[in-house]
Amino acid sequence: MIRKQCITILFLIASLGVFSSLHADSRPTSESSSGDTSWVDVSLGGFMVSSIVERGARIYDYPFFLAFPSIRLWDGVLSLRGGKGFEVTPRPHANPHVRFSLGFFRDDVLFETFGDQDPIQRSRLFAMEASFGASYQFSRVFSVSGSVSQELIEHHGQYAEVDLAAKPLVFFRRKGPPWMIVELKSGLGLGDTFHNRFMYGPEAEKGLNHYFVRMRVVCPALLWGATPIFGISYTEMLGAGNRRGSLLQGNLKNITGMFVLSYRLSK
């Protein structure tokens, strides 16, 4: 009981920043490189997804909604980020830049908002990962990033991911931030035997486990200073053993919709 309460508290703390990364990624280049230092960056907002998918595995079949504040400290050096826990980026505006994070995985959803979660989908135990990542911006349009993670307390497996991102369309205002940014991102995940069996079931094997393609439309400060973000993503499982994983229950392909609304309190 005590352990579950502690896990819930950690989840709430890290969830303070679930759209902190969304907000940071959507900041105009001129704002993030102008030299103006924001020591405390606080936003209010919420997000909704049509279903919850983690590394190709669907863990909740129904729409999920949550609202909370997000916090970034010391001009983005320290972030409380949902899904990643706590992240440190020593030089967030450098190119390339590196990041270190301590995150966790919890498949028992905090609130069953629109339907009951399948018992098999929440059968995984609490896990915590330490990660190292790096990103490089080729131009104002293209960037590449990658990360490696080591699980610390449960299965002790390893996971790696490589992502390629682009911003092919940016619609500018005469003054201020762009009024619309179209973002595309694709990624490929790779896990060892311990990680893949933890995520997908005892039938899983080491190697490539899933890929994803995502599109987002970001409208900075569009609605009375608030930023809406619309997104859709497609994920598909890879590897014969991984695709047979009993925890997946045959859900090998997923299309997920997302909506985020964020209002930045600190200017």
Image (spheres, rainbow, N blue to C red):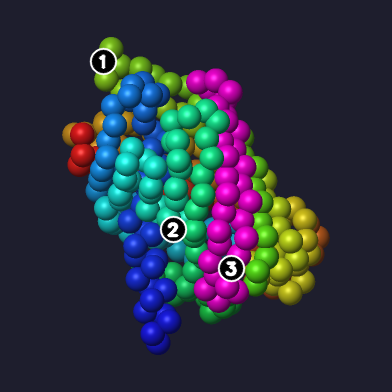
Q: Callout 3 environment at 10 Å: few (<14), some (14 to 19), or many (20+)? A: some
Q: Main secondary structure of the magenta part?
A: strand
Label 1 sits on a secondary structure element that is loop
Residue for badge 2: 85
- Image height of 84 relative to 162, above or below: below
Kind of residue sitting beneath label 2: Gly
Q: Earlier in the sequence, mark 2 or mark 3?
A: 2
Identity of the residue furthest to the front in this view? 90
Label 3 sits on a secondary structure element that is loop
- Tell me residue 137's x, y (percent): 55, 27
Gap between marks 2 and 3 measured at Cα: 14 Å
Kind of residue sitting beneath label 1: Lys
Whether 10 is among the magenta residues is no
Residue for badge 1: 175
If the image is split into quadrants, where does the C terminus sit? top left
Whether 129 is among the magenta residues is yes
Residue for badge 3: 152
